[in-house]
Amino acid sequence: MKTEFSLAQLADPDIKEADKILRACVHCGFCTATCPTYVLLGDELDSPRGRIYLIKEMLEKDAPPTEEVVKHIDRCLSCLACMTTCPSGVNYMHLVDQARVRIERDYRRPLSERLLRWVLSLVLPNPKLFRTSMLLARLGRPLAVLLPTRKPSATPTLLRRIKAMLALAPAHLPAPGPKAGTVFSAAGKRRARVALLQGCAQQVLAPRINQAAVNVLTRHGIEVVLVADEQCCGALTHHMGRDDDALTRARANVSAWTTEAERAGLDAILVTTSGCGTVIKDYGYMLREDSAFKGPAAKVSALAKDITEYLAGLELQRQVNGEASAHDGLTVAYHSACSLQHGQKVVSLPKELLSKSGFVVKDVPESHLCCGSAGTYNLLQPDIATRLRDRKLANIASVKPDMIAAGNIGCMMQIAGGTSVPVVHTIELLDWATGGPRPGDRGLGAPERGPN
Ligand code: SF4
Ligand code: SF4
């Protein structure tokens, strides 16, 4: 794609990067076929190619984004299916991230929208505030039926969004998990030492997930540390264009993990929430212009691994007890989170681990399409998100699973909101297969279906 940036514009490293990305696009349109919003809405401007044109124009003109640009960029899920499909290697992720920062900086949203985004960026990355807000939302859930039900719309109202938030609030909240700074010793001879990202929303909604990871790792000789001073990874605010906040968090985490690695050694930084993993693996890029942090950030990114990537390098010990285990032959629909399959290119490893552990793993048809969760997307764009969820649920139902597994809490919550089939994290099944409890026996069931 031909670009027309001035030399002065190209002196800006972000514009130089955008120019490189834009020039790689040959406008073939292959990406449109796998873009969830294009598949649903059929509008070229809601396709990757259309958005690339909009971003190019916005950056070249160097003028405040128009309402139209904001509308179509806001509807993008950042699912990155387009990056998997693109034959030219266009890095849409870095381009749309830049567009979101520009929108956040130069576009004045309506007051209600600004307030909503401010609240989300304040509450979601902070586990204490998030826990309090979930408790309040539980009280507010009965009132959701009183909110007006409007026709689904690709440009939802504030009330519709509040209704969606109440719908996603779980009926029960588990007790908090172990504190930051806790070290879990390896069983037997120590083979390695890893940090496990504590996450923000996940540690409130489902501490059982990291508990399962700790169980599997320590059972296989890995010492696990929950690093003190670690923060939210910054993914939520990064995807809202609030880069000052995201970069501050990235720097804090790079410092915390680097200090821990120097103090006691770290062989890996493991992540059980793939949305966070994608961003941590990108810290090196995000901090590339920061001379003090770019080196340590690149090291942190290189150490970051999804839990299934790390476990694939170990020989997991199945617990068979002489006969077939209770989980053997159970049919699991594996939902491939976008951040894992498109963002990190971790596609087959989780399924292979589950199969080797005795589960019958079924691929979900249209597995490349997002479930609609996408960070804060299901809160900000609830109607598109619900259409995607219902499509995902129909595809999942077609394989008649006993359980649904995913590697991302956002997807788990989104999918569980519309099905009675248990939704669990992949690591919970691997824990079960290697001697841990059956998922669901830990105290928190799937979130109840909300008043959508
Ligand atoms: S597939 Fe790649 S090269 Fe083709 S239009 Fe989409 S982004 Fe551009
Ligand atoms: S990130 Fe997903 S929603 Fe956004 S343009 Fe690419 S495929 Fe479409």
Image: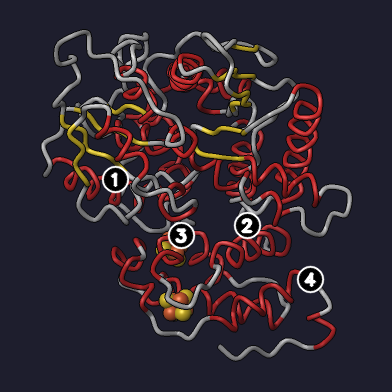
Name the kind of residue labelled 4 in the image: Pro
Picture coordinates of residue 240, whole percent (x, y): 61, 50
Q: CA distance from mark 3 to mark 4?
A: 23 Å
Up/down of 3 relative to 412, above or below: below
The residue that label 3 is drawn on is 80
**For numbered disc 4, what is the local secondary structure?**
helix
**For numbered disc 2, what is the local secondary structure?**
loop
* Ligand 2 within 8 Å, label 3 CB: yes
> Of callouts 2 and 1, which one flags the residue occurring earlier in the amino acid sequence?
2
Badge 1: how crowded within 10 Å, few (<14), some, or many (20+)?
Answer: many
Query: Is residue 353 visible from the viewing direction of this image?
Result: yes
Camera-near label (3 vs 2) is 3
The residue that label 2 is drawn on is 109
The residue that label 4 is drawn on is 13
Q: Residue at x 45, y 30 (%)?
A: 314
Name the kind of residue labelled 1 in the image: Arg
Picture coordinates of residue 301, whole percent (x, y): 66, 46
Up/down of 117 relative to 3, above or below: above
> Of callouts 1 and 4, which one flags the residue occurring earlier in the amino acid sequence?
4
Contact, mark 3 vs mark 4 (Cβ under 8 Å): no
Contact, mark 3 vs mark 1 (Cβ under 8 Å): no
The residue that label 1 is drawn on is 389
